[in-house]
């Protein structure tokens, strides 16, 4: 079996003062994937990433990056991971190319092995190599952060909330670059609050809530776990009384001629739901359905875990 890109076993962290930020968390990030780490505010995501980065000491458990245990082989572990933090951190007076060269120096990358320009080009910053970093747009700064995390060519790239506060267009742009890195073989781990983003990008998603792992599934499986489906039915005349039927989990009148019906797709199908409305003597004028999405799963799981 191929070793995992990241292997986390029984990881716990209790901060001074008693806050238990991680509670016996175990999971693998498979190599070559884009892996999403989701969780509400304060769930413990940054704590986990900071442990991998060597910035926070764990209380118990173990973690390995690209097969290197972070305690037994800290240097190799560190060399195997690039981390893009939430905050933008670089000296605004250096140019992008200088920023990358300095970072490469910090990581002990030999001059002959450096690929600063190549990275800038890959991130769409080739023509900005000699501009002051402070003159870059927000999106360019984010991309420079990604390039900076990649100077030592780590096989694993971690992005901690990289798109918080970034507008949709820049977000799409950044993801295009990240997908490009992934296509070249880089394993990507990202934390995000944007469920839709995770759903679009990630092969697999783990959810942390209050320090505990509550899900770890291929994205498609996770989305498939949402069994509730919503259908809005508009009928040909005003609805006098809201119909009742066992196949409706919930039904309400949202305007005089529209019913919003929730049903469980593992128990009934849309045809049965519509037939039940028809039997009440209404003609159906319009129907719209909403697929369950990751947000539904997320809410169900975090609610259940409370
Ligand atoms: N240095 C610290 N000392 C004490 N408690 C801390 C410290 N850092 C984090 N915590 C607490 O640990 C818990 C987990 O925090 P963490 O930052 O890991 O969550 P998160 O999932 O990254 O949240 P966010 O999405 O808001 O960044 C929170 O309750 C937080 O207040």
Image: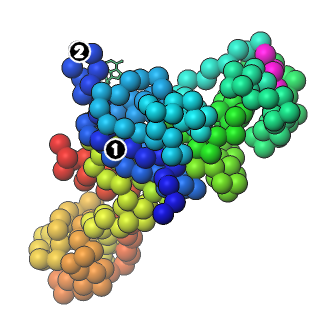
* Res. 88 in view: yes
Q: Nearer the viewer, residue 245 or 97?
A: 97
Q: Residue furthest front?
A: 72
Disc number for residue 9: 1
Some atom of ligand 1 lies within 8 Å of the CB belonging to the residue at label 2: yes
Mark 1 or 2: in front is 1
Residue 232 lies within the magenta run = no
The C terminus sits in image quarter: top left
* Res. 83 in view: no
Q: Judging from the image, what secondary structure is the residue with disc 2 in?
A: loop
Label 2: few (<14), some or many (≥20) within 10 Å?
few
Taking the spot 27% from the left edge, 74% from the top edge, the residue there is 265
x and y percent of residue 206 in the render?
Answer: 38, 50
From the viewer's perspective, tell me whether residue 260 is left or right of residue 154: left
Q: Which residue is mark 2?
A: 17
From the viewer's perspective, tell me whether residue 228 is left or right of residue 291: left
Q: Judging from the image, what secondary structure is the residue with disc 1 in?
A: strand
Disc number for residue 73: none
The quadrant in which residue 109 appears is top right
The quadrant in which residue 139 appears is top right
Separation of residues labelled 1 and 2 (CA atoms): 24 Å
Label 1: few (<14), some or many (≥20) within 10 Å?
some
**Residue 262 in the image: above or below residue 92:** below
**Residue 69 in the image: above or below residue 266:** above
x and y percent of residue 2 in the render?
Answer: 52, 60
Q: Nearer the viewer, residue 237 or 218?
A: 218
**Main secondary structure type of the part rendered in magenta:** helix
Q: Quadrant of ligand 1?
A: top left
Taking the spot 57% from the left edge, 30% from the top edge, the residue there is 75
**Residue 107 in the image: above or below residue 298:** above
**Residue 2 in the image: above or below residue 74:** below
Q: Find the magenta span and give its range.
A: 94-98
């Amino acid at each position: 079996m191929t070793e995992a890109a990241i292997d986390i076993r029984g990881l716990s962290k209790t901060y001074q003062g008693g806050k238990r930020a991680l509670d016996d968390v175990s999971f693998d990030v498979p190599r070559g994937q884009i892996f999403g780490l989701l969780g509400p505010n304060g769930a413990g995501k940054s704590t986990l990433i900071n442990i991998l980065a060597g910035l926070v000491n764990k209380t118990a458990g173990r973690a390995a990056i690209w097969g290197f245990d972070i305690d037994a082989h800290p240097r190799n572990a560190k060399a195997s991971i690039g981390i893009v933090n939430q905050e933008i951190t670089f000296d605004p007076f250096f140019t992008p190319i200088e920023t990358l060269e300095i970072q490469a120096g910090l990581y002990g990358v030999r001059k002959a092995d450096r690929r600063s320009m190549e990275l800038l080009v890959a991130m769409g910053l080739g023509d900005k190599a000699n501009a002051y970093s402070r003159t870059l747009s927000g999106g360019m700064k984010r991309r420079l952060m990604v390039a900076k995390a990649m100077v030592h060519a780590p096989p694993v790239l971690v992005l901690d909330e990289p798109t918080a506060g970034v507008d949709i267009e820049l977000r799409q742009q950044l993801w295009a670059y990240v997908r490009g890195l992934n296509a070249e073989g880089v394993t990507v781990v990202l934390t995000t609050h944007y469920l839709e983003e995770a759903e679009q990008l990630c092969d697999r998603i783990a959810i942390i809530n209050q320090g505990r792992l509550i899900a770890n599934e291929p994205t498609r499986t996770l989305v498939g776990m949402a069994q509730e489906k919503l259908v809005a039915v508009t009928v040909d005349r005003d609805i006098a009384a809201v119909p009742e039927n066992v196949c409706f989990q919930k039904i309400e009148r949202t305007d005089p001629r529209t019913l919003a019906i929730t049903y469980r797709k593992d128990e009934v199908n849309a045809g049965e739901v519509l037939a039940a409305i028809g039997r009440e003597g209404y003609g159906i004028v319009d129907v719209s359905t909403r697929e369950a999405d990751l947000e539904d799963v997320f809410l169900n799981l975090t609610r259940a875990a409370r």
